[in-house]
Amino acid sequence: ETSSSSLYERLRSPAPRPPQSIVALAPAQDLPFSQLEALSLKGAKTFLEHKATTDILFENNADALAIAAHGRLSVENPLTNGFVFYESKDNDNEKEEELLVTVKELFELKRAPSLVTLSACHAWDQNANSDHNLSTPWLSMANAFAVAGSQSVVASQGRVSDLAASVLMKRFYRNLRIHSRAESLKRASLIVRDYFKHPAHWASFALVGDPR
């Protein structure tokens, strides 16, 4: 988890503005609604399937980063928890290969966007085992971005529906134009609840960091 002192320091800074620039990444070919989610974010620079490369993840300068991807958890080594992306290639003729971007690499981000949203299963979990290792509660993908400097991170705490997550994120970013980040998430979750009654679809996402 992010420390209380870290959150206190962030809350002393001015309230964040609605994002002026958004990069949306949806590398998974077998999650069709994740691609629609990325395309639904107004004004976002969108990268789908093999175009969602590690270079774009690590080198973008956007205010907000939206990732809709497969999450992977490791029982043996939580530092290898991560997202499935495509490896950047120097030659267009080279075959794209899937690459796991790990928590360890996310900790080393040179510049973390102010806002990060993670539409991936278990993005806020740190251990694939039901008996979580309490000595490493911060080894989740969400907390890795927070530690790297992101002011707010929205992520799932379990498995999520591709379709429900798409609807929620579309509404969340739309709400950001006039509401705080926490209020935007609340309103988006309630909209999803109207369509998908089971809490697994609308109650899984939570915000870590600055709620403003």
Image (tube, rainbow, N blue to C red):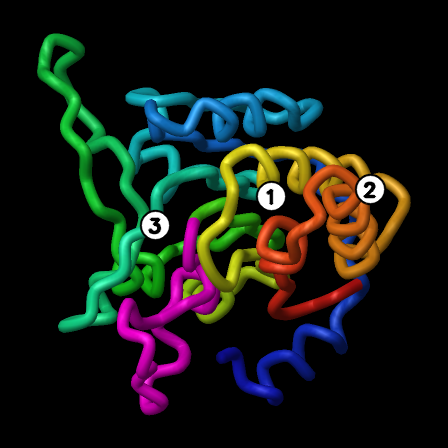
The residue lying at 58 percent from left, 41 percent from top is: 165
Taking depth in this image into account, of 78 and 204 the one nearest to the observer is: 204
Q: Choose the circle earlier in sequence order: 1 or 2.
A: 1
Report the side of 171 relative to 52 (left or right): right
Q: Quadrant of the C terminus?
A: bottom right
Q: Choose the circle earlier in sequence order: 1 or 3.
A: 1
Q: Quadrant of residue 169?
A: top right
Q: Which residue is mark 3?
A: 71
Our reading of the magenta stretch's main secondary structure is loop
What amino acid type is highlighted by mark number 2?
Asn
Image height check: is 117 above or below 211?
A: above
Name the mark nearer the viewer: 1 or 3. 3
Contact (CB < 8 A) between labels 1 and 3?
A: no
Contact (CB < 8 A) between labels 3 and 2?
A: no
Q: Alpha carbon of mark 1 to alpha carbon of mark 2: how far? A: 14 Å
Image height check: is 76 above or below 132?
A: above
Q: Quadrant of residue 85?
A: top left
Name the mark nearer the viewer: 1 or 2. 2
Taking depth in this image into account, of 192 and 196 the one nearest to the observer is: 196
Q: Residues within 10 Å of mark 1 (few under 14, many from 20)?
A: many
Q: Which residue is mark 2?
A: 175
Image height check: is 66 above or below 24?
A: below
Q: Choose the circle earlier in sequence order: 3 or 2.
A: 3
- Most extreme residue toward the top is 93
The stretch of residues the image draws in magenta is: 121-143
Residue 210's label in the rendered image is none
Q: Which residue is mark 1?
A: 64
Percent position of residue 60, x then y: 45, 38
- Indicate the secondary structure of the residue bearing disc 2: helix
The residue lying at 27 percent from left, 73 percent from top is: 129
